Amino acid sequence: MLGRIATVGGLTLVSRVTGFLRDIMLAAVLGAGPVADAFFVALRLPNHFRAIFAEGAFNAAFVPAYARIVKQGGADPARLFADRVFTMLMAAEAVLLALALAFTPAVIGLLAPGFAAGSGRFDLAVELTRITFPYLVLVSLVTLYGGMLNAVQRFASPAAAPVLLNLSMMATLSLAAFFPTAGHAAAWGVLIAGVLEVLLVGADVARRTGLPRFSGLALDDDVKRFFKALGPATVGSAGLQIAMFADTIIASFLPAGALSALYYADRLYQLPVGVIGIAVGTVVLPEMASRIAGGDEAGAREAQSRAVELALLLSVPCLVAFLLLPDLIMLALFSRGAFTAADAAAAGATLAAYTVGLLPFVLIRSVTATFLARGDTKTPVKALLVSVVVNVALKIALMGPLSQVGLALATAVGAWVNFLLVVWFARRAGLLGWDARLIRSVARLAIAAVVLAVALVAGQRFVAALIEPGQMLRHETSLAALALIGAAAYGLAIAALFGRQWLRGLARRRKTATPPAPPVDPA
């Protein structure tokens, strides 16, 4: 699992870095005028549908189902199941695409009521949406292909696909002079990316399992079970998107600068969530589903415990750094031009508030896997919807006294509510049995976190004494020095606390992998 997690996490990191470069290029080419407004509205519609139906609900329902059928029935029943889901997915997407293209002006009127009908922004948003919306059909196909690959333990091409979106948009933006507007260039970049993603992931599927084909529509037991799981997963994904809309609406009432502080803090906070939490969850779900389908309950729990252990090991440094050094991180990364020290302080306080919920956000996908791997999407949705209500209620209560910090803190509390409810539901159902090794590891990681915190506090004083206040790149140099000090302290603590255990495990693995020596012929 470690190799697979490294693959997904590494490619996710590449996607985040290229996404950051894409945003820089978007800002430089599009700016913040009416063309940019029209493009971002055009991008929002397929993105929200993708988050609800494709990457969110579909994966949660399809991957465990496909992995179970592969394990229990073999390749032929799995291929038939994929063919039927593919046929129904394409039929639904075709109807949705036709409706969206026919009623685009009405949809834009709902999404952007501030765009006056007949105005330049409104007409441009309609035109760009008709270019970007087919991306939903393509990315849905990529999601199906990716689910088939993940279920058979293949992760590289689905994880690499989002990188193509960033590269495609940067390529078309660099050729913006050949398009009617820069918004058209960006929109066509989105559509071209969808085609490239289908070719990349589709080629991998064709090589590994064979591409799904159109088949007769038949609601057999496997398809019925899939739709039974898809319904609650869709409700959960929609609830999460509604909460994000509420977040934006509430934040719009805050003083100037609050939305920017939330944006910059969220960009950093989501980095470990994506690179660690989503990567670990993506790998552990098909692993658990396959083991459960084979009757290996003990192996499934072992896989989940090791996934949680690894996620904690990798996320503890982010947790400590974001809590102790938020202002310095913001100053080092963003303090240029119009971004002032006051902006850094506001964004830093917001980052620290978000970080209160970092651990549950990183762990939630690994924990919900115990339900999703069994085809149960209802239970995690119950926990999610309760957490959404708590989240929105706290945002309304805290936005006055704490401004954007209150919104971030409400998000963190909502994450804990979601995580603790899922754990409670799983324990009550007897589906969660973290082993003694994980409990010991949590205690050791807490010690390593304290060692790292002490090293950073002491290191701040040491670095401050060495670097003069007016020195060029003072914040960047300070952060780099503290990163080295923290890495050394955490690495030594982990080696001291886990080194003997890992060496024993490595020795056992080598012993198991080494074939026995052939018997010696006495002659």
Image: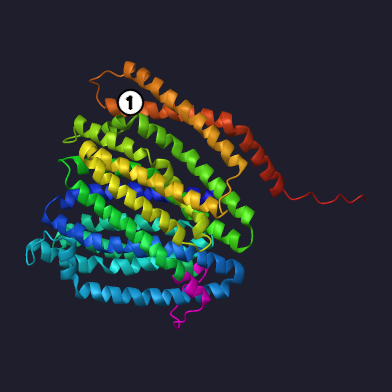
Does residue 200 show up? no
Left or right: where does residue 194 sit relative to residue 172? Answer: right
Q: Which residues are magenta?
A: 207-227
Q: Where, by quadrant of the figure, is residue 181 drawn?
A: bottom left
Q: What residue is rendered at 53% in x and 42% in y?
A: 309
Residue 166 position within the rendered picture, expressed as x and y whole percent measured from the top left: 30, 54
Q: x and y percent of residue 260 in the render? A: 21, 42
Q: Quadrant of residue 135?
A: bottom left
Residue furthest top in the image? 465
**Residue 222 in magenta stretch:** yes
Residue 27 percent location from the top left of the image: 19, 48
**Residue 390 sits above or below residue 108 on the image:** above
- Of 56 and 409, nearer the camera is 409
Residue type beneath disc 1: Ser
Mark 1 burial class by Cα count in 10 Å: few <14, some 14-19, many 20+: many
Count of labels shown? 1
Which residue carries the number 1 mark?
478
Q: Which residue occupies 50% across, 58% down?
A: 371
Which residue does the image show at 40% across and 46% down from the upper left?
A: 417
